[in-house]
Image (spheres, grey):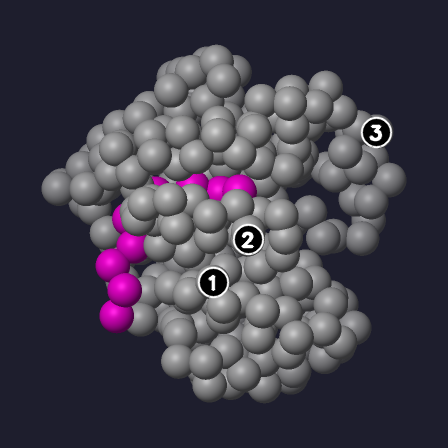
Amino acid sequence: MLPTMKIGDVEISRLIVGSNPFTGKSHLNDAVDADMKSYFTEEQAFAMLRRCEEAGINAVQSRGSMPVMGLIGRYRQSGGNLLWLAQTGKNLTTFDEELDEMMKYDPAAVCIHGELADELYMTGMLDRLEGLLDKIRRKNVPCGICAHFPEVLTYAEEHGLKPDYYMASLYNLSQPDRSHDVNPTGERFEDSDIPVMYRVIRSLSAPTVALKILGAGRRCGSEEQVKAAFREAFASMKPGDGVLVGMFDKYIDQPMRNAEYTAEAIRLAEGK
């Protein structure tokens, strides 16, 4: 088992596996999307999730929508033991229905979707966050807030919203002035965002999970670069924080490598 963090009363490994690769969402280009989609049959997805468990990872995170929610549910029915960290949908008007559906799959915790929180920020409606958190709390599961804008997380702290955890993207992909980039995904990854979000993460009172520490593959030019990103993450956050990493094990044993890099980075950062 890897070192763990506490989300509510739940012990979560400080490396969490993400679900985007299962649906071919690489944030890179169409070719990588297609490679992921063709590789991740249900059988292959199950095999990689089992490998994650073998590497000491005990949790998977995904949005609470089909087909990924169903895939994770069937994995657990087949004997898998991964905890599920759920993320709500992006639409405020369907929040209640989606939350009710997610609860059928026994989430260990539920987080407000980053794009929904970002939209509330951009439309001046961050005061809606408290009510959304209360809806999750009434389901008797730990509640969280995800965001790409650091300002969302700062608002939650300043207004005493007290989520059980945060999820923070190192890259602000919701920034409107980046919506027409030449990148094939239509997203622009600016490295200047990284230190800004790490500063905010260190200021947060709840455990935080950092997203996109590898820049969705942009910081994976070599194994040394990958290792450096893990070291940077744990050196830049609070003790007890964690990372979420999507994994694609077609060419390399990413679950085991990422677990090794996580354990090493924590030892270096915290002397453990």
**Picture residue at 32% right of the left edge, 45% below the top:** 79
- Circles 2 and 1, Cβ within 8 Å, touching? The answer is yes
Of labels 2 and 3, the one closer to you: 2
* Residue 147: image location, x then y, percent: 59, 60
Secondary structure, mark 3, is: loop
Dot 2 amino acid type: Met
Secondary structure, mark 1, is: loop
Q: For the magenta stretch, what is the residue range?
A: 9-19
- Whole-angstrom CA distance, mark 2 to mark 3, is 32 Å
- Is residue 164 visible to the viewer in this orientation of the structure? yes
Q: Mark 1 points at which residue?
A: 105
Q: Name the residue under label 3.
A: 182
Near mark 1 (Cα within 10 A), the count class, few <14, some 14-19 or many ≥20, is some
Residue 14 belongs to magenta span: yes
Dot 3 amino acid type: Val
- Whole-angstrom CA distance, mark 3 to mark 1, is 39 Å
Q: Mark 2 points at which residue?
A: 69
**Picture residue at 45% right of the left edge, 80% below the top:** 139
Choose the circle earlier in sequence order: 2 or 3: 2
- Is residue 244 visible to the viewer in this orientation of the structure? no
Secondary structure, mark 2, is: helix
Quadrant in the picture for the N terminus: top left
Q: Is residue 120 above or below residue 49?
A: below
